[in-house]
Each structure stands twice: as C-alpha cells, then as structure tokens.
Amino acid sequence: MRASAVILRNELRILRHDPVPAVILLAMPLVLVAVLTEALAPVLHSLGYTDATGAEQTVPGMAVVFSFFAVGFIGFAFFREHGWGTWRRLRTSALSPGAVIAGKVVLPLGLMGLQHVALFCIGLLFLDLHIAGSPAGVVLVAMAYCAAIAALGLAATAVFSTVQQLNAVTNLGAMVVGGLGGSFVPLRALPPWAEAIAPVSPAYWAMRGYRSVLLHDGGVSTVFVPVAVLLAVAAAALALAAWQFRLDDPKTTWG
Amino acid sequence: MRTSLVAQGAVLAGRPLPLALEATALVKWHGDVHALRGVDLCVVPGEILALLGRNGAGKTTFVSIVSGLLRPDAGTVHIAGVDLAKNPRCAQSLLGVAPQQLGVYPVLTVRQNLQFFGESAGLSRRSARQRTLTIAETLDLTHLLDRGAGALSGGEQRRLHTAAALLHSPPLVLLDEPTVGADAETRERVLQAVRDLADAGTAVVYTTHYLPEVEALSTKGAELKVAILEQGEVLVHASLAELVATHSTTLAVFTFDGPPPLWEELSLDGLDISPDGRERSSDSLSLATHNPGSLLPGLLARLGSHADRLCAVDLVRPSLERAYAGIIGHGARDTHTAGSFAETGTGSVAVRETGKDPVQSGPLAEVTCVPDREPFQGE
C-alpha cells in the first residue's frame, strides 16, 4: 500500500507538471454534452422517450467514450518510464512490480471517476437530467465500466510495444467502441448490422446499464447483467495482461 | 536473512561480517550466447571493485543479474547476506543502482526526483527530504534542487542519476559506467563520491572503460580491487597493486634515426627482459623489463655504432592500462605490444624527440620517464 502511494504521488507530480491532457479529458466531454444534448432530445422522443431531455443519452454516452481514453493514459504511464530510462530504476528499487502497477493505475481510475461525477453533476444541475431509476445502479455501472477500461489499459500496455500502437488503439478504439456501443446515438438509431455486433463492445453493456436506470426506471437488479459482463471483460483483460506483461519487455516510445 | 560466507579479511572482532556482495557460480545464456560462464565475485564492505572488460565480456549481464534485472540460469547472488532470488525486495533495498542508461524524470525538479527515488528505496518522506539535501551537497546539486531535471546539462543529469542511487545509504552500490559522457568536473565529483562512500564502509562495484579512472579510485582507507571479465569468465580478480605488479612491466622504447639494429646484432644475454617483451619497428626497439635500472645501461653499452643514431629513450611505468592490455592479450585493440603503444599513441608513451644529435650511451639521467598522456577509452 505504501509502495503504491509512493508511485501515485509521483504520478501526481508528473500530472501537475503537465495537466493539459487530463484537463482535456475532463473538459471535452462537458463541451460535447452541452452541444449535443438538445440535438439528441428529438431522437429520444422519436424512440418513445417523450419526457427525455437528451441528457439521458449524452451524459452517459460521453462518459463512456471519453473514459476509454484512459486506456492510453495507463499505457503512457508505463511507456514514458521506458523513454526516460526510469523503468530500470523502478525495477531495481525496493518497490514490488505489483505495487508499481497498482500505483500507476490509481490515477487514471481517479480521473475516470472524476469525469463521471463531473458529467452527471452537470447533467443533473444544468441539463435536466433525471435519473428515473436507482442512482446506485448508475454508480455500479460506472464502477464496473471504469474497472474494465483500467484492465484494458493494462492489457494494451502488455501487448503493444510502441507508443504509436497504443495511441492508435486508444484514439480509434474510443470512437469505434463508443460508436458501436451506442454512446453517440441510441443503438436503435443505428443500422441493424451495427446493432447485431454491438454486444462485442464494452460500451454497449455500459450504455445498456445506464439506459435501464435513466430511461426505464430500473433498479439495481436491472444492471446486474451489464455489470457482470463488464466485470468479466475486466477479468479477461487482466488475465491477458498477466499473461503478456513482461517487466523486461522493451517499449519504444517513438519510432 | 542468511549470513553468507566470510570473505578474506571480512572479520570484525572475531565475528564474520556478511559480504556486501557474494555472487557464486553465475551462469547466463542470452540465446546461443554464453554470457556468463560461472562467475564468482565477492565484495567486502568498504571495498571498491572495478569491473573491467571489453564490450560483450559480460559486465552488463553481471550487473543486471546483481541488480535483479535479469535472472541467472544458474548460481546465486547474496547482497549483504540476503539471497536475491529468495527475497528480492529485501535484497534490492540493500542496493543502490545507477544503470549505464540515464534514468531521471525530466519533467520533475532535481528535488522531486531525489525525493521520489529516496521514497522508492524505502525511505520515509521525511528521511528522503533530509537525505536529498545531504546527497545534493555531496554531488554539487544543491544550487540545482529546484531546477527541472530536463533543463540540466548532461554532466548535471549524470550527477543526479548517480545521486539517486546513493540516497538510502545502501551497503552495496552498483555504478555502471557512471562517467560516460561526463566532463572532467563531473567525473571528479563522481570519483570523489565513490571514494567517500568506500571510506565510509560502502561496497562499490564500478564498471568502466576508462582505466586511468580506476587508478584514480584508490583511497587511503578502502581497498581497490579489479576484476577483468573476458567472454563471461573472470580472468583476474586482484587488488590494483597486485595486478599491476604481476601483469605490467616497465617499457623502454629506444628510438633511432633510421632503422634500429637487428636483434641479432645485439647481444641481449644477461639483460632483464620479460619473455616476449621485445618488439622492433621501423625506427624503434621496445623492451619490457621488470628492472629498467639494469636494462638501460646494459643495452646502451651493447648498441655499439648504432648508439650514434639513438634519438630518444623513453620509459613507460607499469600501469593498469598496460596490465590490462597484457591480460586481455589478443583482442583487436589489445594485440598492441609494447612498441606499438608508442606508435599509435593510444597507450601511455609520448615519444620524446631529442633532435638530430644522438644521445650518447651512458647515464640514466639522459632517459626520460614519460607520464601517462591520454586516458584510454576502451571499446
């Protein structure tokens, strides 16, 4: 625990030096929610949600899409150590590999949590977001989704060897996974083929959970299946990370 | 914790002291390459071990294994008595490592770097703060504490990199080529820090290609040993003084105006010349000897008419550099025999030009003893 705290404090120092990526991660979805909410209200109305304001789609949708960028945040936290030559130092320190890894995941997890809190607060305060069902259901889905993303971040770190690979997967992945999962527009507004393959995206399960609580008055029990699937994704990604993660793998920061 | 075997001399008040480092029968393969072939090395507290060898000799593999970055295929490593394989975290907490590759956080200040590396070595936040100030003073970083590490010069970064290994006062410090690319001032700072560490009882393993630097590590209080690795084996492991005395001779270089006499023209019988210690080049004769005082008058007397063409006689003292060349022997750089040191200028001899007037055979007063000229940088 102490060792992870040492790493976390260092990650915070590095973040303080260059907070721009984190600020963008937090600010961009807020801007998009403000811009898109009104435009999506008619779409939800056309699907039968006549009381919807649009925030029921944009708030969770943007949270899901932009949380995916944490995959890159986690990967970069490791790749930059290789680029700075500090990874070897960490490996020869008294810190265990597990503590180092845990310390590096905590900050992106916190950013994802902060992002969710900020988006839902803005939605509730300014965009007439109404949580028809159980707020606890929202929290459960958010926690399970963030856990899945963090695990995917570790798996990506383990699998990819260059920062370009990581960058491409993060940026494209956020768009594809989010779009396919119904984060930008409701799934029922997508073509049938997209609807058919959507369950392969973790975003689909997150949005399904959010929708059941926000639009269908669902209770905690209605999010059990989405939460279970997201936790299964997290477990599978962790297993992949554990299988592929090699402490002495060279990582190329550029080139 | 296990108390390891006792090194020679590692006894205090009749009780055995654990060795700072005990590497036993280390074997490592990199694919088909046999990087280490049963290396045994130990370092007692307060000793400096200079680890020498050509690129690919196994130095970095050895350092990587001792620092826990690589696992040996066979053999054991104990650091201050703690088995590295069985208790890696504990063993690594007793170790300070400055890898060859620079490793600092460029976006953090010097203070933040040292604070983090101190805490990651197991120091409390308060202790890390205090040690940061101490170690910064040792390596002349105090005035740079609040500067970003990325804004430092190469030498300053190198000092910061080294300082990070010393923060927690470990019983064993591994410094892998800590002065690569450093200026003279940084080099002296690092060398002084190493000498101070050893005098204070810390064991230091120091790898380098700069042989004069090794000689500069000698201190009054600490023992300086040299281990030479070649193709994964320890060729020599001895104190610097023993190594130089055993493996290096004085080299006498006789430079002529024109071709030197043939060996057959000179009677070398009875002169103290080391076996295989002679070489004839286009304008000089080089002779290696343990006893220049008797060789020089003897040879000068036997030059006969050739003495008229003798331009200079230079003596090169025994040195680690010449001992190293003799031990390593037959590598590309190290095929240089005594005479070729003078020709190539890579060794210690600076050829003395005495003009056209021949030096008369006679007293040693007319013979120069040339100090080392250029630090040798190995491959």
Image: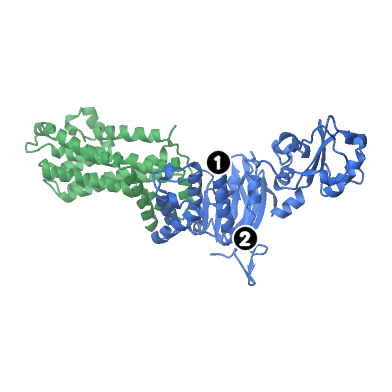
CA distance for labels 2 and 1? 29 Å
Position of B152 compared to A206: left or right? right
Indicate which disc residue A243 carries: none
Please name the residue shown 67% across and 48% down the image: B228
How many C-alpha atoms fall within 10 Å of the one at disc 1: few (<14), some, or many (≥20)? Answer: few
Q: Secondary structure at mark 2?
A: loop
Q: Which quadrant of the structure image shows residue B18?
A: bottom right
Q: Colour of chain A?
A: green
Residue B166 location in percent, x, y? 50, 55
The residue lying toward the viewer, choosing from B128 and B261, is: B261
Chain assignment, label 2? B
Chain label for disc 1: B
Question: Which of the 4 image quadrants contains residue B44?
Answer: bottom right
Query: How many callouts does the rendering have?
Result: 2
Name the residue located 78 percent from the left edge and 43 percent from the top edge.
Answer: B368
x and y, in percent, of residue B270 in the image: 91, 46
Question: In this figure, which residue is indicated by the disc labeled 1?
Answer: B181
Dot 2 corresponds to which residue? Answer: B44
Place of residue B264 in the rendered image (x, y in percent of width and height, measured from the top left): 92, 35
Residue found at x 44% / y 51%: B143
